[in-house]
Image: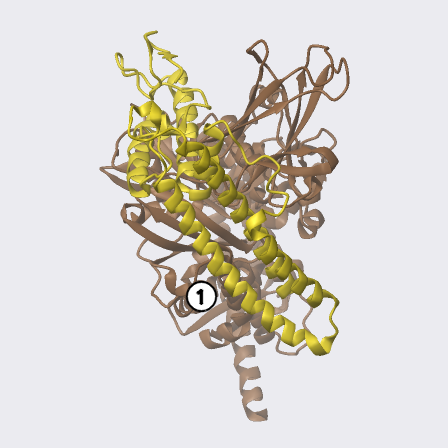
Chain colours: A brown, B yellow
């Protein structure tokens, strides 16, 4: 039987894993060997899409054609999108469901829905899995944040369907992490999952009992992640690099600083001091940052994560000392100060033997193994994260299924008419914990057709069923005739069945559908960035370049530009290398000059100090 | 007990999750008796440990995760069966929920009685309400004294709640055995009195909880 893969569809990065010889294993990119696929998508001028690393690199120069964290927009309405995202993207909700308008360089626009964008990422992972396994992959387990509501889960499942994947199960991310560590085998344990990703922070308190995983509480910050630590480092780098104290940073400088900050962060996870070279507009600088300085500059960020942990424990009605296991998830948990703070707060060393970037995907693969029937000793029982109910008289939210109810779960409710000869009853389904319907998240509306009769006489029983994925379905039965009634549910934020069908028909052109095509596109992206960098260096460091050398470099650049309009990716790569080669002495001189400046300024500073 | 018809082989039989002749999974009606669902004796004094064991055992057999590779029909049956199992477990595991379920099952319910003050609590409730009113209308000077009195009241209330819960557990455990079960030793007339007692106990608990919440809110304000 064909294998089922486990997928971590992350805000910043996504991964795919599978069970091999009873062990979960990440399937890396066949060509680069990278386990992570950046969750980035970028629209090209020909209307096709780039996905992953190339898309992320392209986003720096083409922000309006690219989306870096589509997960924030899954299954929500424009009113839930935060101000920063509204500034960065153009949204369009005219057709009911939220759309993101992308603009290519040629002035063309394309409206895409979040599930479509996610489906491109899933298709890339599907292809990755297929080339690694040598067989077709059509079934998957996908992880979602524990707090995802019905619409967000539905949107994730829609994305799978658009990618040609049958999503057998959506698993909560913290639960997947606990599965990867095999903690579900414990008799009984209280587990805290601390997930600090690129742009989001989630903390979940789980109660595990004989294979039952109950989410007691979740908390977090959708605007706190490794990127914030990068930004603090960036500020430090700017302070250090800004010798005169009045630097004007160009957009390119900022991009270089951002990259350097990320590198420095990685370096500081194991070293006490990080040294980075910055090829800035004003010249090249070599800057040293100590771990201590970094920790001082980011102490408030660490404290914010701990404050959220404190709140999550309070919500769960537990104390830090009750927690038996702490699991670290997300690349940013490699930061030593974060680990230290977690250990101090919970009073025990966190589990960190599994790669924090991979742990959720590995857990998804374990669950995939359970579903394929390979492992029968385990069973994961999840709970619904938010109460589900309907709007009743006076805009009151009436709960039908309480939060933390084990799923699948069902509730029945009888409806009748208020006036004579009423032809239908309207039902508004919501999810949330507040008293009033207006404060809860609208999921869907539907109308039940009624045979005209005296008010109060018709009786229709509606069954709300939440399946093992936390997704709602609704069915209705006329109590008097005992006939099943079909009802059409209109989702408040997701895609309607019709919209899904039409999207399935006109499935997007994925730029890299064929491998050669994809190599060409990636080579072009690379060529574009080096041509850009060369031009900039020539402009800024004219004095370091003699006429003859400049001519050599320009010849190489022209050849590369010409190759880019062709279709031979090998030729483009060769010419990229040639241009690199031609400009190497020039680059070296730029570097030497900047080190000299750095040393001079340093000694001047020291003398003054 | 309503008979069911197996969705696979068609045999008519007492309700159970697996057909007694072809072993096919059955989606029992959602209103199937919870004691039948968990295959426990129909008695309100449930042994929670035994209940949990039975629940996990059935979950392993019924959960949709076990039916991913089966037909769409079996998958649907598994989702419905597990939803029913979960509802039955949740209700029977909690003493108060089980008490309310037992009341409804015996053809009775709490109705609107929860709205009015249960007679046995009247004096006590009046006393606490008066203190709450005093706190709300008091001036700053006497507030501190009143607050400390109320903290003491809340402590008493918590103890009272615990005592009442323990009494409910005892009431359910000692419930007269179901005469349908053929026990001729237990006279029928004990049942109505027990039902009346159950009703009072449940509405008192519900009322005390509301009072506790009011106190908590007043103290936090």
The residue at 32%/38% (across/down) is: B51
Residue B173, position as x, y percentages in the image? 35, 41
**Residue name at image x 48 percent, y 68 percent:** A276
**Which of the two residues, A556 or A214, is positioned nearer the viewer here?**
A214
Q: Residue furthest left?
A: A21
Task: Tell me the quarter of the picture where residue B76 sits.
Answer: top left
Nearer to me, B8 or A583: B8
| Residue A571 visible (yes or no) | no
Residue A456: image quadrant is top right
Residue A106 rendering spot, x and y as whole percentages: 70, 36
> In the displayed structure, does residue B126 sit left or right of residue B181?
right
- Residue A300: in sight, yes or no? yes
Residue B119 left/right relative to A192: right
Residue in the picture at 63% in, 43% down: B115
Drawn side of residue A586 relative to residue B177, left or right: right
The secondary element bearing badge 1 is classed as helix
Q: Is residue A325 left or right of residue A559?
A: left
Quadrant for the C terminus of chain A in the image: bottom right
- In the rendered image, the quadrant that contains the N terminus of chain A is top left
Does residue A555 lie above or below A119 as drawn? below
Provide residue B28's location: percent of width, then percent of height: 40, 20
Read off the residue under disc 1: A338
Image: A415 above or below B112: above
Which chain is indicated by disc 1? Answer: A
Q: Is residue B149 above or below residue A567?
A: below
Percent x, y of residue A503: 59, 23
Q: How many numbered marks are there? A: 1
**Snapshot quadrant of residue B114:** top right
């Amino acid at each position: 039987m064909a294998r089922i893969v486990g997928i971590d569809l992350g805000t910043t990065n996504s991964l795919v894993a599978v069970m091999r010889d009873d062990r979960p294993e990440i399937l890396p990119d066949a060509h680069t060997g990278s386990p992570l696929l950046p969750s980035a998508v970028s629209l090209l001028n020909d209307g096709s899409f780039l996905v992953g690393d190339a898309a992320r690199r392209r986003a720096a120069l083409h922000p309006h054609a690219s989306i870096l964290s589509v997960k924030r927009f899954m299954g929500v309405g424009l009113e839930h999108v935060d101000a920063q995202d509204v500034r960065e993207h153009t949204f369009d909700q005219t057709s009911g469901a939220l759309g993101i308008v992308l603009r290519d360089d040629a002035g063309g626009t394309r409206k895409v829905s979040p599930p479509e964008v996610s489906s491109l990422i899933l298709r890339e992972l599907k292809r990755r899995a297929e080339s690694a396994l040598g067989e077709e992959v059509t079934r998957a387990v996908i992880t979602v944040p524990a707090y995802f509501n019905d619409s967000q889960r539905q949107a994730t499942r829609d994305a799978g369907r658009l990618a040609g994947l049958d999503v057998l199960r959506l698993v909560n991310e913290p639960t997947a992490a606990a599965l990867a560590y095999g903690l579900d085998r414990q008799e009984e344990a209280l587990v805290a999952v601390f997930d600090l990703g690129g742009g989001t922070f989630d903390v979940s308190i789980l109660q595990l009992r004989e294979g039952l995983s109950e989410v007691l509480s979740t908390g977090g910050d959708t605007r706190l992640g490794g990127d914030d630590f990068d930004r603090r480092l960036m500020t430090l780098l700017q302070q250090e690099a800004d010798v005169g104290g009045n630097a004007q940073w160009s957009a390119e400088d900022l991009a270089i600083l951002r990259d350097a900050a990320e590198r420095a962060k990685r370096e500081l996870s194991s070293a006490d001091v990080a040294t980075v070279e910055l090829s800035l507009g004003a010249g090249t600088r070599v800057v040293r940052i100590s771990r201590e300085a970094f920790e001082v500059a980011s102490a408030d960020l660490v404290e914010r994560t701990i404050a959220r942990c404190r709140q999550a424990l309070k919500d769960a009605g537990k104390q830090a000392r009750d927690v038996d296991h702490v699991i670290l998830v997300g690349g940013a948990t490699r930061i030593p100060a974060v680990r230290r703070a977690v250990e101090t707060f919970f009073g025990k060393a966190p589990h960190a033997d599994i790669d924090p970037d991979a742990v959720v995907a590995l857990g998804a693969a374990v669950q995939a193994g359970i579903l394929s029937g390979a492992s029968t000793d385990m069973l994961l029982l999840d709970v619904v994260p938010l109460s589900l109910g309907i709007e009743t008289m006076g805009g009151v939210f009436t709960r039908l299924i309480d939060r933390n109810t084990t799923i699948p779960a069902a509730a029945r409710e009888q409806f009748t008419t208020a006036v004579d000869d009423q032809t239908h009853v309207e039902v508004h389904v919501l999810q949330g914990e507040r008293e009033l319907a207006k404060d809860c998240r609208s999921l869907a509306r539907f109308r039940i057709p009624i045979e005209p009769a005296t008010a109060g006489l018709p009786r229709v029983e509606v069954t709300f069923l939440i399946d093992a994925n936390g997704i709602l379905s609704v069915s209705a039965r006329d109590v008097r005739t005992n006939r099943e009634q079909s009802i059409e549910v209109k989702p408040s934020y997701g895609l309607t069945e019709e919209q899904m069908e039409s999207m399935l028909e006109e499935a997007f052109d994925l730029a890299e559908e064929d491998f050669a095509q994809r190599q060409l596109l990636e080579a072009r992206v690379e060529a574009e960035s080096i041509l850009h960098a060369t031009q900039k260096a020539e402009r800024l460091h004219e004095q370091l370049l003699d006429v003859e050398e400049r001519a050599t470099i320009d010849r190489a650049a022209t050849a590369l530009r010409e190759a880019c309009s062709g279709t031979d990716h090998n030729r483009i790569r060769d010419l990229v290398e040639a241009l690199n080669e031609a400009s190497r002495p020039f680059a070296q001189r730029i570097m030497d000059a900047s080190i000299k400046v750095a040393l001079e300024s340093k000694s001047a500073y020291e003398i003054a100090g | 007990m309503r008979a069911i018809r197996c969705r696979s082989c068609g045999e008519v039989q007492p309700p159970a999750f697996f057909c007694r002749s072809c072993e096919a999974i059955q989606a029992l009606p959602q209103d199937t008796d919870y004691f039948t669902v968990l295959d426990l004796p129909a008695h309100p004094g449930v042994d929670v440990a035994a209940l949990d064991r039975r629940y996990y055992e059935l979950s392993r057999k019924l959960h949709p995760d076990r039916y991913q590779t089966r037909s769409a029909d079996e998958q649907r049956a598994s989702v419905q069966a597990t939803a029913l199992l979960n509802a039955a477990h949740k209700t029977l595991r909690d003493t108060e929920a089980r008490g309310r379920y037992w009341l409804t099952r015996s053809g009775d319910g709490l109705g609107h009685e929860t709205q009015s003050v249960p007679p046995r609590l009247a004096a006590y409730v009046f006393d606490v309400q008066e203190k709450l009113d005093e706190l709300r209308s008091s001036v700053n000077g006497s507030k501190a004294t009143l607050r400390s009195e109320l903290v003491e009241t809340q402590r008493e209330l918590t103890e009272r709640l615990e005592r009442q819960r323990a009494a409910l557990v005892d009431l359910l455990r000692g419930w007269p055995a179901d005469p349908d079960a053929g026990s001729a030793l237990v006279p029928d007339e004990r049942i109505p009195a027990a039902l009346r007692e159950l009703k009072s106990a449940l509405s008192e608990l519900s009322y005390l909880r509301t009072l506790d919440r009011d106190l908590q809110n007043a103290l936090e304000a």
